[in-house]
Every structure is written in C-alpha cells, then in structure tokens.
Image (tube, rainbow, N blue to C red):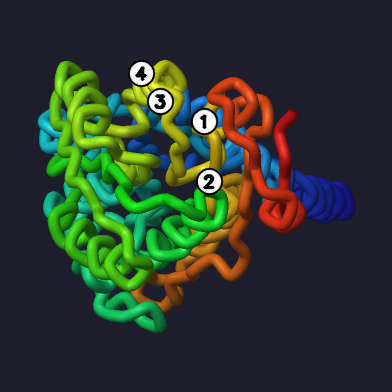
C-alpha cells in the first residue's frame, strides 16, 4: 500500500515537472510577414534596418517569424499579380513600400493588416480615413504631400538666385501624380518660377525628357518621388550630371549615389518604425487603432562633389544650413 502511494506520488511529481518542459518544447506559432518593396536593390538596404529592429523586439527569422519578400522593380503593371500572390500566401501582416504598392494591396484585401512606409499624403490618396484613426486595415508611416516640393523649390532658388524655369520630372505611374504636378506648379508660381512638365513612363522617355529640358532651357530639375524614379535612379542621375543640371531629389539615396541635393525625411527611421507597427499588430492591436505617423524631422543633404563636377558653387549661407554634406 505504501509502495503504491509512493509510486503514485512519484508519478504525479514527475508529471508536474515534465508538463512545463513539454509545453516549452512545443513549437510556437511562426508569424508570417509579407514585404512588398519597390526594387531589389533598395529593398535590401531597407529590409536590413527593418530586420534589425525586429531582432531588437525579439523576433528571429526561422524561429518565430518568416518574411516573404517581393519587389516589383518599378513595373507597376506587376503589382496586381504580386498583390494577388500575397493574398494567397495569407500572411499575418504585409509591409508595403511606396504609394503604388500600398494602393495595390489596399485594393486587393480589406482583411490582412497592411503597414505602409515611404508613402505620402495617405489621407488624400485614400489609404486611411484619417491620420488619428485609419478606419480600416492600413496604418503605418506617411510623409506630407506635394507641399514638401514647395520647400525643395525654395532651396533650389536659394542655390540658384537667377533661376526662372525648373523641369519637373514625374511619372503618371505614380498615384495622383497629375495632382502633385498641379500643386507643385502653384508653389512654383508663388516663387516666380515656371514649372516645366517632364513626364516619363518608360525607360526610353527619360532621355527624351532631358532633351526637352535642355531645349527649353530649364535651369534646374525637381525629381518627383515614386517607384518609377527609384527604378531608374542611376539613369536620371547620369543624365543630370551629363547636362550639368542642378537637381533636387526625393530622398537621400539619390544624393548618396551622386545626385546633387535632397530635402526629405530620414528613410532609415521609417523602416525601423515599420517594425514597431508590425510588432503591435502581431501582438493583437488592430491597424484601425494605430495612428498613422508623419515625420517631424527633415534633412537637407548636399553632395559637394557633384556640385563641383557640374561647376556649381553652393552659397556659403546655404551650405551652412545643410544637415549633411557629402564631399
């Protein structure tokens, strides 16, 4: 009898000790994260920051998360198929880079949470109902709309006091691009600048737009943001250098690659914050309850080496205001 009681007690004790170990040994659910980037090259750098932040938050690929990555390389016509593919994969959350990708995914699903990054004017574009409360399955980070181009034009005017005509390189493949042009045109008029429309939708269009800029004597170039421009970054920078045309770009990547100037928010912080959004969603917060963030800090970056290459002297007063100077 005593032996029986002893063995029962021993069995109970072993069971109590083993249950936590068995529970711990059970594999945790692996969260699936979709990532729809613009180009393979830019996605590699952006995703490095995104992954670093996820690691800081306790996520490890292959253990508790899996990332499905796709890029459309500036070919907007591919987005519908890629969006459909993501819906079939049914990830727990999708990170969408840029206006084009966000629009395609938003049109494809109202159920899967979407964290947007490197977008602009999210309310006007219909991605969210308001910045405070998205009202749907989309949240994330969004920069101001075309009004930032007014500041970029001001800086061009300060660098080139005699500037009278600016070429505006844009693509209709970018959502509401025509609206952006009209609003930027209004900002240009306020600065007594003529804005020359340079539309490019195919790779072959880019050389033609620069020929038009030269023929119509544009004194500077303003390059609109968007997937098409990102995909053709090198081509655009090379033509600007060849024509010795001072250019203002949409983000730091262009300037780091040899472009002249940019006035933009810090992209690197965007991708770290995108990881924070993903973390909240994976922990159960609904996208509709997470406010959309807008950047509060903008950087003015000048590539002095490029300025010298095109024979441009940056006024000391402007140079002193730069947050970063590449020499």
The local crowd at label 2, few if under 14, some if 14 to 19, many if 20 or more residues have their Cα within 10 Å, is: many
Image coords of residue 53 (percent x, y): 66, 46
- Distance between mark 2 and mark 3 Cα atoms: 14 Å
Query: In front: 298, or 154?
Result: 154
Q: Which residue is mark 4?
A: 235
Decide which of 45, 55 is in the foreground and name it.
45
How far separated are the C-alphas under marks 4 and 1? 11 Å
2 or 3: tag closer to the N-terminus:
3
Q: Which corner quadrant of the image does residue 18 belong to?
A: top right
Instruction: Identify which residue, 200 or 2, lies in the foreground.
Output: 200
Mark yes or no: residue 90 visible: no
Residue 7 x %, y %: 81, 46
Residue topped by disc 2: 262
Nearer-N-terminus badge (3/1): 3
Q: CA distance from mark 2 to mark 4?
A: 17 Å
Residues at marks 3 and 1 touching, judged by CB atoms closer than 8 Å? yes
Is 168 left, or right, of 296 in this rendering? Answer: left
Q: Earlier in the sequence, mark 2 or mark 4?
A: 4
Residue designated by label 3: 240
Crowd class of label 1 (few under 14; some 14 to 19; many from 20; radius 10 Å): many
Sequence-first tag of 3 and 4: 4
Q: Residue at x 54, y 66 (%)?
A: 295
Residue beneath disc 1: 259
């Amino acid at each position: 009898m005593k032996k029986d009681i002893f063995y029962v007690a021993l069995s109970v004790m072993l069971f109590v000790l083993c249950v936590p170990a068995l529970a711990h040994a059970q594999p945790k659910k692996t969260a699936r994260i979709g990532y729809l980037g613009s180009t393979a090259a830019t996605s590699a750098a952006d995703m490095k920051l995104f992954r670093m932040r996820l690691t800081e938050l306790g996520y490890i690929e292959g253990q508790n998360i899996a990332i499905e990555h796709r890029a459309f390389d500036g070919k907007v016509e591919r987005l519908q198929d890629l969006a459909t593919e993501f819906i079939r994969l049914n990830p727990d959350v999708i990170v969408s880079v840029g206006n084009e990708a966000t629009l395609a995914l938003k049109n494809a699903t109202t159920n899967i949470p979407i964290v947007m990054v490197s977008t602009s004017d999210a309310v006007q574009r219909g991605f969210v109902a308001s910045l405070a409360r998205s009202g749907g399955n989309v949240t994330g980070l969004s920069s101001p709309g075309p009004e930032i181009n007014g500041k970029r034009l001001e800086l061009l005017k300060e660098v080139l006091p005699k500037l009278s005509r600016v070429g505006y390189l844009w693509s209709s493949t970018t959502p509401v691009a025509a609206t952006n042009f009209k609003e930027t045109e209004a900002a240009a008029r306020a600065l007594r600048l003529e804005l020359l429309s340079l539309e490019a939708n195919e790779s072959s269009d880019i050389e033609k737009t620069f020929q038009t800029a030269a023929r119509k004597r544009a004194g500077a170039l303003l390059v609109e943001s968007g997937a098409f421009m990102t995909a053709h970054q090198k081509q655009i920078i090379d033509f600007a250098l060849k024509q010795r045309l001072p250019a203002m770009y949409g983000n730091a990547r262009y300037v780091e690659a040899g472009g002249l100037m940019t006035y933009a928010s810090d992209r690197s912080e965007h991708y770290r914050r995108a990881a924070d959004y993903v973390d909240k969603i994976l922990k159960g917060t609904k996208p509709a309850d997470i406010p959309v963030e807008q950047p509060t800090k903008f950087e003015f970056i000048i590539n002095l080496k490029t300025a010298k290459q095109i024979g441009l002297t940056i006024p000391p007063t402007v140079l002193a205001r730069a947050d970063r100077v590449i020499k």
